[in-house]
Amino acid sequence: MKLKTQNSVNTTTYCHYLFFFPVQFDWILGFLFLKSNTLAVLNMIEYIASETLRVGRFNFSSDQIRELVPESQAYMDLLAFERKLDQTIMRKRVDIQEALKRPMKQKRKLRLYISNTFNPAKPDADDSDGSIASWELRVEGKLLDDVISSMYDSDYLKRKFSSFFKSLVIELDKDLYGPDNHLVEWHRTPTTQETDGFQVKRPGDVSVRCTLLLMLDYQPPQFKLDPRLARLLGIHTQTRSCIIQALWQYVKTNKLQDSHDKEYINCDKYFQQIFDCPRLKFSEIPQRLTNLLLPPDPIVINHVISVDPNDQKKTACYDIDVEVEDPLKSQMSSFLLSTANQQEIASLDNKIHETIESINQLKIQRDFMLSFSRDPKGYIQDWLKSQSRDLKMMTDVVGNPEEERRAAFYHEPWSQEAVSRYFYCKIQQRRQELEQALAVRNT
């Protein structure tokens, strides 16, 4: 029989295989840490490269600008402060990325409310339901500090009551309801719709004793240890990774690792009782551990469904310890994915870059004017030499600057021929222009 519902408002895998390599266990832990941080390291390298280019874009081309404009030192101080701030934010982003890889759980109190109502029979009722006495059992619950979570996150959504459980079984008195109708069960499925409570309605006019069995939905899954292993490790129910870590700690503390063959563990008397062998390999532990892990115990609550109208105590409250996701996790994820200010920052960076380029160009023009005012003749000569060198580089013309600067160089026989060729080309060019002009006028 199904319940009615009412609606209202991976580290573990690594730990398994750590036992395959006992000789370099600490080195493997370091390797796994480095592996998990590879993305963070690459992000940091990319950030350093981009920051180096960025600083180059936003720096002045010469220290003389700082001397000419004393106020520019304030800008350089702000640039250095921004660089430190960016580095701090980048480190925090890396820390947040690493924190999100680990389970972030908080211990919370889930308050369970079990209540019942009684509907006495009505002899004058027309329908059959009203003429039969019945009772209704309601199982509801909520987290005690939902208000605190909503303060952390404005988008916080209250978890449904059923989301905390894997199954719920209500066992009624078999003598009253028979062997086929005394169990009410609810089990989670992939298509389960979460609900804020469960409701059971049955006919009856006598008080009924019932037992509620609630199985918490642990994420990641938890297991109850074999009593012998639980006493040895001091753990009753825990995740598989924590159990394996506790086993390894016990092996190291008691020096059970074989001194000659590091792959083996020499079992002490407690290990021999649990694993039933004097010696075993590290690689065998995960497989042997499977038989020692049991499903966790359900939460058992005994309740009396009272039909006495004089009984005012018809609601019972119980507090259950549950683990929920840290409300800061959603904020941390939002921070990493946030791009709200990136466009504005990029626009401001472009404006700063354009301003810096303009200042650098003005500095070049100022130097030009100052040099010209101090020594006009010498500056013009230097400028012509510079332009001549640039022209020769652009046209691939080879010459001798020392010969070209003397007048005798231009009295050589080739100069007369060059002058004649030059004027001949100019005359031909002018003739073509006149012919084209006359042709256009005649048409």
Image: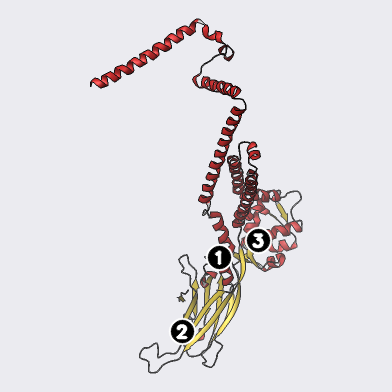
Which residue occupies 65% across, 43% down?
A: 70
User: Could you tell which of marks 1 and 2 lies nearer the N-terminus?
Assistant: 1
Q: Which residue is mark 1?
A: 153
User: Could you tell which of marks 3 and 1 lies nearer the N-terminus?
Assistant: 1
Evaluate whether residue 22 shows in this view: no
Which residue occupies 49% across, 8% down?
A: 415
Give the quadrant of residue 101. Answer: bottom right
Q: Callout 2: helix, strand or loop?
A: strand
Above or below, 318 relative to 29 = below
Which residue occupies 50% across, 76% down?
A: 197
Q: Amino acid at mark 3?
A: Cys
Q: How is the image coloured?
A: secondary structure
Q: Which residue is mark 2?
A: 202
Tell us which disc is closer to us: 3 or 1: 1
| Tag 3 near tag 1, CB within 8 Å | no
Evaluate whether residue 116 shows in this view: yes
Q: Which residue is mark 3?
A: 242
Q: Please provide percent x and percent y for residue 183.
A: 50, 78
Q: Callout 3: helix, strand or loop?
A: helix
